[in-house]
Amino acid sequence: MTIPSHVESYDQSTYWVAPARNFRTSARLHLQHFLFQNTLGYLLEPAVEKSLAVSSSQQLRIADLACGNGIWLTELHSHFAKNNISAQLDGFDINPVNFPDAAYLPSSVTLKQLDIIAIPLPAELIGAYDVVHIRAFVSVIPDSNLAPILAVANALLKPGGFFQWEENRGDRWITESPAPQVGQSACDSIVQVLQGGMAQKGIRNDWVDVLHTHLDQFGFRDARLIVQEKRKQDYKAWTEDYLMVWEELAAFFPPKEQAPNAPLTREAWTGLFASAVKETEQGVVVHQGKILTAVGQKP
């Protein structure tokens, strides 16, 4: 069954600063972080960490862009503490609502509100970092134009510093049923709606599959791509992570009383979502297959 999309009100530039990005979003980001870690097995890509250990004689400085609730940085702090590595860890996000209070953060971690693609960047950040990290930024890039974020990463890095970017294909959804008798039509329909909405707004994520070539073309040295399959035992958790996103999307569909002729009303979406949840309770999973990590070094 194909259901037309009606998501014209979705705007990547404002989605993450909306009031609804609250504790539920933060809880989902915690889950997403540990799912990434289950897949990757590292915080810093091992070759990057090895290079830093060999070349650095001073305290490292590491920036996490679009840091959310800072979970990547606080986990990195714990990893460094166990290995006697000294580092200043700075997180930046456009919306500070999910930041832990500074009283509960390690002294090495700071979180600051910043629109990372605003121009100009604060002068004190230019050329300041040994590593710039970003993860799951795909939903904020509507037109496949990576130049703004690559320019920011390049500007923040010291010469010889490393850029690490981990990503899912936001336009690729895989639904699977554990047995032929377990239906998955509602999950399939939601995937069709999402993919139709993205196509309608011209959003393409095929650049993720060749992300390293974009780093190379921008001037990063030795750009490479690491592709890692998600673990089957994590599929249920990935499904629940995506269900939280799908539930939030109800706000982008018009109520029936306001738009009775809309291709998909809020009430219809809510009903479809409820059916999808029931399918997942019977074992249906939704995932995006793999995580891709691109790494490059500033000349």
Image (spheres, rainbow, N blue to C red):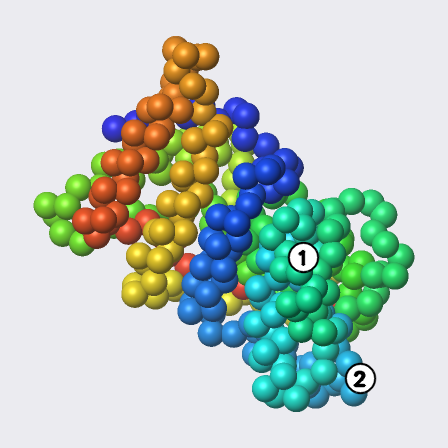
Question: Circle 2 is placed at which residue position?
Answer: 58
Q: Quadrant of residue 145?
A: top right
Q: Which residue is depicted at the point 54% across and 39% down?
A: 20
What residue is disc 1 on? 65
Secondary structure under tag 1 reads strand
Disc 1 residue type? Answer: Leu
Is residue 28 visible to us here? yes
The Cα–Cα distance between marks 1 and 2, rounded to whole angstroms, is 22 Å
Compared with 269, 64 (above or below) is below
Is disc 1 surrounded by few (<14), some (14 to 19) or many (20+) residues within 10 Å? many
Secondary structure beneath label 2: loop
139 on left or right of 288:
right
Name which residue type carries label 2: Gln
Q: Which mark is residue 218?
A: none
Q: Quadrant of the C terminus?
A: bottom right
Q: State the residue at coordinates (78%, 87%).
A: 57
Q: Residue furthest right?
A: 123
Q: Is residue 245 left or right of residue 69?
A: left
Seen at 51% across and 67% down, the residue is 226
Q: Quadrant of the N terminus?
A: top left
Percent across and percent down for residue 267 are 35, 23
Let me know if residue 228 appears in the view. Answer: no
Farthest front residue in view: 103
The answer to whether 261 appears left or right of 40 in the picture is left
Mark toward the start of the polypeptide (1 vs 2) = 2
* Numbered marks: total: 2
